[in-house]
Image (cartoon, rainbow, N blue to C red):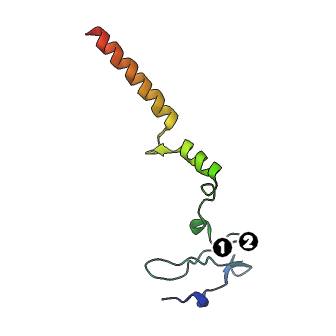
Amino acid sequence: MQQANTFKNYVWLMGGRIRAFQCQALSKRSKLQCKNAARKGKRLCKFHFGKTGRITIDGRQRCAEAKTIHGRETRDKREIRAEKFKEMKTLVSLLK
């Protein structure tokens, strides 16, 4: 298990020509430090940094409006489809 004070500070990129901070995230299973370079001015890499849009109230509202199910339909499309099904039901009931 890796101790918190034994983190590597830097990782070398481009064959040793560029020095960048190393991501400070730890693996849950192996407890080893992530080997990727951290984002500029941050402590975590692009995989562990996460999205910041959900932190603010506006960001949460944007995420709630943009939510999709199975990656195919937005809420607007579901509402339109529900309205069309209601119209179809009324037309079928009129035919009977």
Q: Residue furthest top?
A: 95
Q: Which mark is residue 41?
A: 2
Q: Residue furthest left?
A: 96
How far apart marks 1 and 2 lie (CA) works out to 8 Å
Provide the secondary structure element on which disc 2 rests: loop
Q: Is residue 36 left or right of residue 16?
A: left
Q: Which mark is residue 38?
A: 1
Q: Which mark is residue 65?
A: none
Tell me what residue is drawn at x 47 percent, y 31 percent: 79
Q: Amino acid at mark 2?
A: Gly
Quarter of the picture containing the C terminus is: top left
Tell me what residue is drawn at x 67 percent, y 84 percent: 9
Q: Is residue 20 left or right of residue 78?
A: right
Nearest the camera: 55 or 70?
55
Vertical arrangement, residue 50 with respect to residue 59, above or below: below
Other-residue count near label 1 (Cα within 10 Å), few / some / many at <14 / 14–19 / ≥20: many
Which mark is nearer the camera, 1 or 2? 2
Task: Give residue 21's position: percent from left, percent from top.
Answer: 69, 78
Vertical arrangement, residue 68 with respect to residue 51, above or below: above
Q: Amino acid at mark 1?
A: Ala
Tell me what residue is drawn at x 64 percent, y 78 percent: 22
